[in-house]
């Protein structure tokens, strides 16, 4: 793609990076076939190629974002299916990240939209606030239908409907601690506690820690670690995201200094994609660039790490598992085979649902801010999963689990919960009914 940025514009390293990404696009349109919003809406401007044109026009002309650009960028899920498909290696992830930051700095959103986004940024990354908000949602749920009648308040209705009817008690496994291996030590890792997952389903990290320690791995839950920054990063709130990244880099760097780490284990794939990008996010920070790159190199999805431990092959369980490959795992991190190979070795029959490359519509806060598109993607995803006639569904991301679980009666559990159960741990809560 030909670009026409001035030398003055290119002096900004962020603009220079965007320009180098834009120049790789050859307009081939392969991305349109795998883009969930284009497949759903059929609008060129809701495809990666269309958004690239909008971003190019905005940045080249050095102008503020307008309503049209914001509409189509907001509809992007950041599922990154386009990057898997693109034959030219266009780094769409960092381009759309830059566009979102530009939007946040130059566009004044309507008041209801601003308020909802502020609430999400102030609540979701903080487990205590999030837990309180979920409990309060029970009071507001009967009014969801009323909020649905007012278009700017549809996200409020979506929030109320997504909130679980009961919130699990806080887990002690989310507290700072070192969990000793149950057998001869063969490794030492830190594990991300995160923000939303320990509130919605603390059993995931409990299962991960139980399995790892039984396998001889020491697991550290460091003091001071917090939200990875993914939620606000995708809102274009750059400084808030970088603040989260710097805090976690400091925390994990101390853990490395205190006893070494073989990996930083992440059980929420959306968080894993962001942590693996810390090196890029902080590349211009002279204090953090090197440290952040080191931390990103240590970050591993829990299945990535488990796959290196050569787990034994178990007898067949007689259960068919539909494996939902979260976009952040298959497209963002390129982890595709490890989860399925682990499940098969653990004795499960694994099925790949049709259209597995398409997003379920969760995408962080997308199912709140874009509820109508999200609902169509959810219905499509659930239909495809149910075609495999599974006994249960496995996934590696709490957002996907919440989204899919809200539309099917088939139990959905985290991949690591199934692996923990298969190798001597407790049966997952979702399967105890």
Image (cartoon, helix red, strand yellow):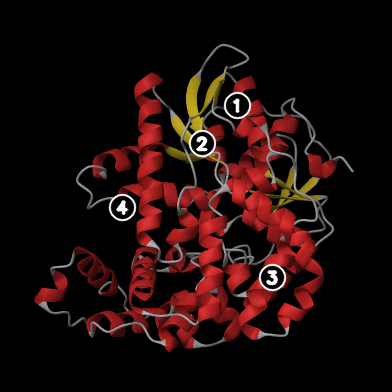
Q: Residue furthest right?
A: 433
Mark 4 = which residue? 280
Mark 2 = which residue? 265
Which mark sits nearer the N-terminus, 3 or 4? 3
For the residues labelled 4 and 1, say whether their Cβ atoms are less than 8 Å apart.
no
* Residue 152 position in % (x across, y down): 61, 82
Q: Which dot marks residue 9?
A: none
Q: With 15 as the anchor, is 370 left or right in this view?
A: right
Mark 1 = which residue? 212
Q: Visible in this render: residue 295?
A: yes
Which mark sits nearer the N-terminus, 4 or 1? 1
For the residues labelled 1 and 3, say whether their Cβ atoms are less than 8 Å apart.
no
For the residue pair 105 and 90, the one nearer the viewer reads as 105
* Residue 198 position in % (x across, y down): 63, 43
Helix, strand or loop under label 1: helix
Q: Which image quarter: residue 422?
A: top right
Q: With 144 as the anchor, is 34 left or right in this view?
A: left
């Amino acid at each position: 793609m030909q670009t026409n940025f001035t030398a003055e514009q290119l002096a900004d390293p962020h603009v220079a990076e965007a320009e180098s990404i834009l120049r790789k696009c050859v307009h081939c349109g392969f991305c349109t076939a795998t883009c969930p919003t284009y497949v759903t809406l059929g609008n060129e401007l809701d495809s990666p190629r269309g958004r690239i044109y909008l971003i190019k026009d905005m940045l080249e002309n050095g102008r503020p974002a307008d309503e049209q650009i914001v509409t189509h960028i907001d509809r992007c899920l950041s599922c990154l299916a386009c990057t898997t498909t693109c034959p030219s290696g266009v780094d769409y992830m960092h381009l759309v990240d830059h566009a979102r930051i530009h939007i946040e700095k130059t566009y004044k959103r309507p008041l209801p939209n601003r308020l909802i986004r502020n609430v999400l940024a102030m609540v979701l990354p903080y487990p205590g606030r999030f837990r309180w908000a979920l409990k309060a949602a029970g009071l507001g749920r009967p009014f969801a239908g009323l909020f649905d009648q007012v278009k700017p308040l549809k996200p409020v209705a979506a929030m109320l409907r997504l909130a679980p009817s009961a919130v699990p008690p806080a887990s002690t496994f989310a507290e700072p601690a070192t969990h000793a291996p149950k057998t001869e030590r063969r490794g030492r890792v830190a594990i991300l506690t995160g923000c939303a997952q320990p509130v919605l389903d603390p059993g995931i990290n409990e299962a991960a820690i139980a399995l790892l320690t039984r396998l001889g791995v020491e697991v550290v839950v460091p003091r001071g670690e917090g939200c990875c920054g993914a939620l606000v990063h995708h809102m274009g709130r750059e400084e808030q995201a970088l603040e989260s990244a710097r805090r976690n880099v400091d925390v994990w760097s101390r853990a490395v200094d205190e006893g070494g780490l073989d990996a930083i284990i992440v059980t929420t794939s959306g968080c894993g994609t962001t942590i693996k990008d810390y090196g890029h996010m902080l590349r211009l920070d002279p204090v953090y660039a090197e440290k952040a790159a080191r931390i990103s190199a240590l970050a591993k999805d829990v299945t990535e790490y488990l796959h290196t431990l050569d787990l034994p092959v178990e007898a067949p369980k007689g259960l068919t598992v539909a494996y939902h490959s979260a976009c952040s795992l298959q497209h963002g991190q390129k982890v595709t085979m490890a989860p399925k190979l682990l499940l098969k070795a653990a004795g499960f029959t694994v099925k790949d649902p049709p259209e597995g490359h398409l997003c379920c519509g969760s995408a962080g806060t997308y199912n709140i801010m874009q509820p109508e598109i999200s609902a169509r993607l959810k219905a499509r995803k659930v239909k495809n999963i149910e075609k495999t006639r599974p006994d249960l569904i496995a996934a590696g991301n709490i957002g996907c689990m919440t989204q899919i679980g809200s539309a099917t009666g088939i139990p959905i559990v985290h991949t690591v919960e199934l692996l923990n159960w298969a190798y001597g741990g407790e049966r997952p809560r979702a399967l105890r009914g």
